[in-house]
Amino acid sequence: MPASKKSRKPSYTPAQYVEGILRGDRIMLARAMTLVESRKPEHQALAAEIIDRCLPHSGQSLRLAVTGTPGAGKSTFIEAFGLQLIEKGHKVAVLAIDPSSHLSGGSILGDKTRMQQLASDLRAFIRPSPAGTKLGGVAPNTRELIFLCEAAGYDRILVETVGVGQSETVVHSMTDFFLLLLIPGAGDELQGMKRGIVEMADLIAINKADGQRLKAAQQAQKEYQRALHLFPPKPSHWTPKVLIISALHKRGIDELLQLIEVFKAQMEKSGFLRQNRQKQAVYWLHERIDTALRNYLQQQPEFKKRMLKAEEKVAAGTWSSLQGSLYLLEALIKRN
Ligand code: GDP
């Protein structure tokens, strides 16, 4: 029962949220996610408590990043792949790109049909990222959403993202496996501009390997296989693979799924999966502290005053950025 009946939306205690999530209640899961995404301090405090209570029940999933430029076929792929996972007995959560976001490049028609079949299956849970997410579908708190999904029993979590580099780095720091979807013909541009993203990939899937594009896809597969050899070995010692698939015709999906399971088994055996997650947790602690400190400082009148002055001086070229930062730090050190 809701703790308060007066407010328009019922409010629950953290214990009620957690109990609902652990029971697999999708509405409670969605509500808790909204709290995690909220900027209101009272929501954040509640969210933090829910997350902490869910943490002991999280961690059992495989966290997969699915990235690729708009039109690469991410949603078509996620639908085909997700349905296959479900068939194998998994519960699938998708933290998806909000189709209304301009970054996704989604058309109105495309939006309506996005992952319809998967969305209507009770063994899948699809959560679009809030509108206006700058990082193409992923945000620092996406990591917390992953924990909540895990506590609700989802054991394969797909985080969809699109961007030009920054969003991929963020999603890479919160997932176990990085899947890059490419389409034949876009190779040259990607080799140069998105080298860093290719380097992060555990698996490159050349999509749309059907009809007239099949030959080009096979060619791209060879090229990327060659290109991957030039990168230094990964800390995981996993050798990245290049597959050709057709998400539309559901070809190559099974092979891809098997490869991911091989990855999981290998990484569990070597201990990399656990070590990597520990590293990610510490990384995010530092990120959070950086953000919290900056927010705190920006609310201090003395600091704000000095910041304005430093910005002015640095813009005018009177001070170096080093000088400006020392001036700001002085305000803090003096106080202690
Ligand atoms: P997203 O923007 O990356 O999510 O891409 P979509 O999944 O919306 O796909 C963009 C377009 O490519 C749609 O018209 C799809 O039907 C089409 N598409 C996706 N996968 C394939 C494929 O394997 N083969 C072909 N021929 N078309 C595909």
Image: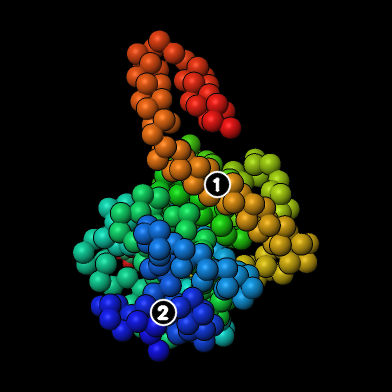
Q: Is residue 27 left or right of residue 152?
A: left
User: Can you identify the residue that label 2 sits on?
Assistant: 12
Label annotation for residue 22: none
Instruction: Using the image as rendered, state which of residue 159 and residue 69 is in the foreground.
Output: 159
Q: Judge the density around disc 1: few (<14), some (14-19), many (≥20) Cα neighbours within 10 Å.
A: few
Labels 1 and 2 touching (C-beta < 8 A): no
Q: Residue at x 38, y 85 (%)?
A: 2
Q: Residue furthest bottom?
A: 1
Asked where in the image residue 88 lies, by quadrant, the reply is bottom right
Tell me the tag on residue 289.
1
Could you tell me which residue is drawn at 34 percent across and 19 percent down?
Answer: 312
Q: Secondary structure at mark 1?
A: helix
Q: Quadrant of ligand 1?
A: bottom left
Residue 29 appearing in the image: yes
Q: Residue at x 62, y 76 (%)?
A: 57
- Up-down: is 10 above or below 47? below
Q: Tell whether 58 sits left or right of 20.
A: right
Residue at screen point 45% across, 49% down? 167
Question: 31 and 166: which one is in front?
Answer: 31
**Residue labelled 1 has its Cβ within 8 Å of some atom of ligand 1:** no
Mark 2: which amino acid?
Tyr
SS at badge 2 = loop
Whether residue 321 is visible:
no
* Labels 1, 2: front one: 2
The image position of residue 85, as x and y in percent, is: 53, 78
Residue 173 location (% of width, % of height): 57, 52
Side of 241 relative to 296 (left or right): right
Image coords of residue 52 (percent x, y): 57, 68
